[in-house]
Amino acid sequence: MMTSRRQFLQSSLLATGALALPRTMLAGGTVSRRAAGGRVVSTWDFGVGANAAAWPVLARNGAALDAVEAGARWAESDLCNSTVGHCGYPDRDGVLTLDASIMNGDGSCGGVGAIEDIEHPVSVARAVMEKTPHVLLVAHGAQEFAISQGFAKKPLLTDEARKAWREWLKTSEYKPKMNVERTRIPGDEHNHDTLGILALDAHGKLAGACTTSGMAWKMHGRVGDSPIIGAGLYADNEIGAATASGVGEEMIRNSASFLVVELMRQGRTPREACRGAIERVVQKRPAASKNLQVCFLAINRHGEVGAYALHPGFVYAMHDATPGPHDKLIAAESIYGGGVVR
């Protein structure tokens, strides 16, 4: 059964010991202290669950790549959300397709786009990275590859998602807008809440993963930014890592996650780099930017974390071993809407 994000947090915090940790809501800005043993950050409030799945890997001095895969797999199967994984809403033809990518800080990477009936696209993306000479596989070819690697084919579209699609067919209106729950501006609440997750491990290595069911009611065959390296995700051990959430076409147009990392290479903090990428989106399409949401999250090689959004409402989750609350929800600043979101 699909739940609101508030319901998800309430129920999962009670039901899962790993999540039953004190959490604090912090104002926007850069988290600057390097965390001994590593740090993991994820987009949106359901990132708390993803981080909880990733943290045990980092806690035993495991690799950042293994940690982000574990966090993304949690979102794909244990979270029931209309924009990520098996509970995602379908395209306008009633078909659920999933996108995902994974990237190591050494430059190795893989992605899958518009894949059907495979529960863990992030793990298929890792198989693309490790077992093929390619970076991106899509649609039926991605599914065939997944099956050849031992991934089970199974129907994923839920009854509730099918019901929502049939209701949408009554008008068949497709106007991607900002998420009303996130921004408090009227729009389509079933869009662009990608799970992006970034980790820095105890060895100083970075990795990231990104997974989503994409925009509800999209054209069949549409692929967003999440599986595209440099758009929805980028990681570089020398500098940092970045991920994005929002209307994917804007991330693709601006090679946005790569841009965030390159701005950090120029000396900007993660927060400043995310803001710089947001400003680029506004500069390129000022009129359009007022009616869509774009969010960036970044971490540098020192463990500093920052985020920025076009509009209010974007939060990210952070987990590390520093004294005090280990799970933190941090509200990002935004270009529009008066700065820090409370």
Image (spheres, grey):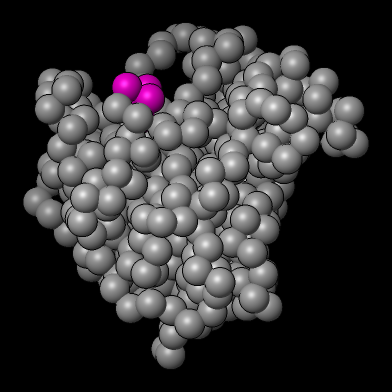
Which quadrant of the figure has residue 256? Answer: top left
Which quadrant of the figure has residue 188? Answer: top left
Q: Is residue 165 visible?
A: yes
Q: Is residue 187 visible?
A: no
In this view, the residue in front, 105 or 48, is 105
Residue 66 in the image: x percent, y percent? 67, 58
Left or right, residue 89 beside residue 159 = left
Residue shown at 54%/31% (left/top)?
227
Residue 221 in the image: x percent, y percent? 58, 12
Task: Report the span colored magenta.
Answer: 249-253
Residue shown at 28%/51% (left/top)?
265
Name the image quarter holding the N terminus.
Answer: top right
Residue 91 in the image: x percent, y percent? 57, 17
Give the vertical position of 276 relative to 315 (above or below): above
Give the vertical position of 317 relative to 44 (above or below): below
Residue shown at 52%/10% (left/top)?
219
In this view, the residue in front, 237 or 73, is 237
In this view, the residue in front, 166 or 342, is 342
Left or right, residue 335 beside residue 93 = left
